[in-house]
Image (cartoon, rainbow, N blue to C red):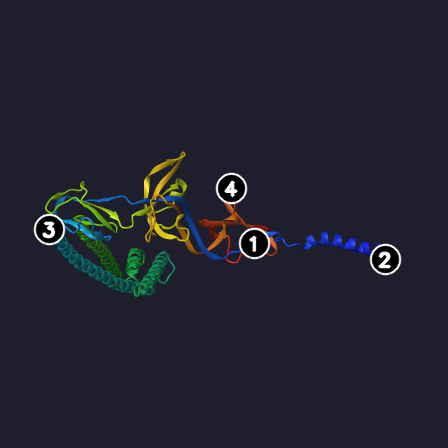
Amino acid sequence: MKIKKSWIVIIIIILLLVGYFFIKPLFKSPTDGLVTEKIVKGEVLQEVSETGSVKATEDVGLGFKSIGKVSKINVEVGDKVKKGDILASLDASQVLAQLQSAKSALDYTTSQYDSGVSSARDDLRSAYNSALNVLNDTYTKIYNSYNAVVDLQNTYFLTTDQEGIEVLNSKNDIQKKMSDVKSYLDLVQANSNSAIDSAVSVVLTDLDSIYNDLKIIRAQCDSGIYYNNVSSTSKISIDTQKTNINTAITNLTASQTSISSYKIALQKAEDSTVEQAQADVDSLQSQLNDNYLASPIDGIITQVNIKKGQVASPTQTAINMLSTEPFQVKVAIYEQDVVNVKVGDATKVNLVAFPKQTFLGKVLSIDPAETIIDNVVYYKVTIEFPNQPDGIKSGMTADITIETNKAENVLRIPKNAVLQTNGTQTVQIAKNGQIQNVTITTGLEGNDYFEVLSGLKEGDEIITGKK
């Protein structure tokens, strides 16, 4: 019995082990063994990193942009100057006089412009108001014509002969056109000028149709038995309505022409010479600015090569200076990365000699000419950074990081989660206990993340790797 019990225990243990290894996979989560991450919004940062070296700023030579007599020199060798300080100037009396004259011309032209535009707008506004009155009068004429036709039909054309049918059809058409005109009148009363434009165009078409209807009705009055049955007074009444409708056509056409003319006049007034007068002022102001030599940086004057009263030319170096912060970082950027770099991009500078400090700077310039290093194309980039530490020296190694683009508070996804297949980007997500492949569209590609434009939403659980 003891032996039998032992075998029973062994068998049970074996069955449990078999059940554990065969049944457990049936309840295994598809995400077991995978690393998942929920998508949230954040920052996508695109950066270019490279190693360069500290270089001393070279002597900066400054010259005037125009030729002229030197009227004033504001600095001497050894003077410290700030960016924007005027170092020297040329005689600008002639340009100043021209500029003053141009400003006066601009003031006059602007005044004429304001007056002309205001007058043209008033004329156009008056033309629209007149057109509205003509539309109202037109409706009255159509209404009177319709009533005259109704009286004529009720008096003479009560039978369903050919003439009676012609009068009935024409009367119904006049009634329909009258309803259309009334709808447009209701619309333009409290609407824009464009509504009046549309109403005038449509009503003119309706008037032509009404005039033809009246011609048909008048013709029936002289047809067959109606030649003698219809009184002269009734015939004259229809003729009068034809004349009235024709007058309405003439008046409305005149209104349409008037509006068009005043629109052209307003456009001409708005296209006056104000822009040219302003351009003349801007041009002379630029010439005046060229008579002043301003410091492009904070620095120290090292040479003054001009004297008061001499004529300076654009080809002459008038003043030399050195930056008060004499060091910059020179770095060669690979051609594939330099396309993302722009002058003014924010930059972090880490000097190997000062490992505990990070200096903030910006891209100062990008050399347009290539530099070949080991048969690879690079472009030299100059980076300036203030607050330089004591002890900095030319030639020191600098690790730089240029922030080329940034998107903030956007949906983002780790780059290692994105699969590229034949130009299509996909990710795997865990949803409802299953792993699904989802096609996505990405925007900015950062160093660590892609910006997600479509295909995913915040909170989706994505697969980023294996445990």
In this figure, which residue is indicated by the disc labeled 1?
36
Q: Position of residue 359 (x, y in %)?
A: 37, 52
Label 1 is placed on what type of residue?
A: Thr
Label 4 is placed on what type of residue?
A: Asn
Q: Nearer the viewer, residue 355 or 166?
A: 355
Label 2 is placed on what type of residue?
A: Lys
Q: Is residue 88 left or right of residue 151?
A: left
Mark toward the start of the polypeptide (3 vs 1):
1
Residue occupying image coordinates x 14% and y 52% = 99
Say whether marks 4 and 1 touch (CB < 8 Å): no
Label 3 is placed on what type of residue?
A: Ser
User: How far apart are the two marked residues, 3 and 1, measured between alpha carbons?
Assistant: 74 Å
Picture quadrant where residue 333 is located? top left
In this figure, which residue is indicated by the disc labeled 3?
93
Residue 5: give its label: 2
In this figure, which residue is indicated by the disc labeled 4?
422
- Frontmost of labels 4 and 2 is 2
